Image: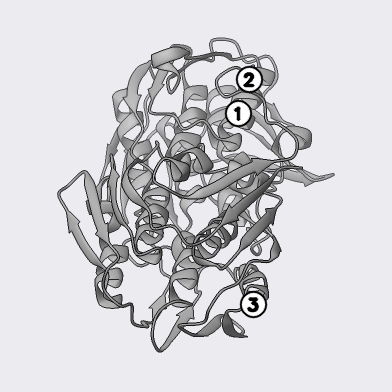
Amino acid sequence: MDKFVIRGGNPLLGTVHVSGAKNAALPCIAAALLTEDPVILENIPQVRDIETTRKLLSAMGAEVELGYGRAQHRTSICAKKLASPEASYELVKTMRASTLVLGPLVARCGHARVSLPGGCAIGARPIDLHIKGLEQLGAKITQEHGYVEARTDRLKGAEIVFDKITVTGTEDLLMAATLAEGVTVMRNCAREPEVSDLADLLNKMGAKIDGIGTSTLRIQGVEKLRGAKHRIIPDRIEAGTFIIAGALTGGDLNVAGCDTKHLDALLDKLREVGVKIVSNGNSVRVMGDNPLKGADITTEEYPGFPTDMQAQFMALATQAEGTSVITENIFENRFMHAQELLRMGANIKIEGRRATIKGKSPLSAAAVLASDLRASASLVLAALVADGETIIDRVYHIDRGYENIEEKLRGVGAQIKRIGEMLPKRGTASA
């Protein structure tokens, strides 16, 4: 099992480039199941979750072509024939986004059998809202032996009001509604940029979706969707992770190829903390020469402070003057990284959904364990400023969502190396 070895103390200097958003690419890949025609996606990050999804679509009978060389971040998917509309447990056990194929499969094939999802151990992720919405669209749902099975002659438009904001639920039902008969109105939808990116792709494919970027989506169902070409948006979470890395290490780092309007909540909070930031639309320069001061955050649905940046902000808070309070409103079990930060010398107290961090704690190297994707990132950030050599185990979590993070960090001055089992060479994995 791979590990990262990181020696702290180096400021990050230079330019780091942001990859495409994993959380936008996954639903867009699933959307290719809605049409017989090829869908070409660009700016696809080379991370484990993407490879898992490619294998999943291939197992169903789709043809998935990977780009090589200069086109290595492009994929072409043709789901002309779907021999097996099923997502098996073996393929989706490591990834929570597996439910994203449920809506497209039942809309296109009239039948879907999908394993309940896996992924990070950060709390319950019930798919009740997916199931309730599909039933409102006319699907008959059964659950047994860890699988959800859906059947219908054809989905029919309906009014769906989400009891709770759900990103994957919004995406799943949005895809299903594009091929439903009549009009579907979805209320209390997630407004994340990744949802809007999916809706933009679907409209390119011939869907009729209004209200993109708002909490109410109106979908006029169509008989058939066509192929399209689409470029995935930049990864706002990767961008935010590097921005915090630059601030935390006292560096001068240019984070290039991002969309700064997707980062407003984070950038506003970092300015409050004392970080010097210059943004120009598609890049952020972060200068870490100001002293950091504590600040409180509360995670919220977009456009609030993202839960996927909470762990990274906690690492920053350990080095800020004063006390910071983090309230986690999205997932109930997302402070697992705090225990590992304590091993490195952080002063953190957890009470339910609230973490209190007393800052300016000297961090020292330790052997630590990554528990989930974003927890991994927080440990990398802490190791960059810790005294000595930190060893982070189970970095397969970080490989699920960050493309070549150790290479990108080395390129701007970090002392980081990967040891252990070698991963397959990037760009050569089969679909």
Q: Mark 2–mark 3 contact, CB under 8 Å? A: no
Q: Which residue is mark 2?
A: 429
Which residue type does callout 2 highlight?
Ala
Q: Mark 1–mark 2 contact, CB under 8 Å? A: yes
Most foreground residue, 335 or 57: 335
First in sequence: mark 3 vs mark 1: 1
| Residue shown at the point (45%, 62%) measured from the top left | 309
First in sequence: mark 1 vs mark 2: 1
Q: Quick check: can you spot residue 156?
A: no
Q: Which residue is mark 1?
A: 51
Observer-side mark, 2 or 3, equals: 3
Q: 10 Å neighbourhood of mark 2: few (<14), some, or many (≥20)?
A: few
Which residue type does callout 3 highlight?
Leu
Observer-side mark, 1 or 2, equals: 2
Q: Quadrant of the N terminus?
A: top right
Which residue type does callout 1 highlight?
Glu
Residue 42 x/y as whole percent? 37, 24
| Residue shown at the point (66%, 31%) measured from the top left | 112
Q: What is the secondary structure assignment of the residue under circle 1? A: helix
Most foreground residue, 359 or 118: 359
Give the number of the disc on residue 342. 3
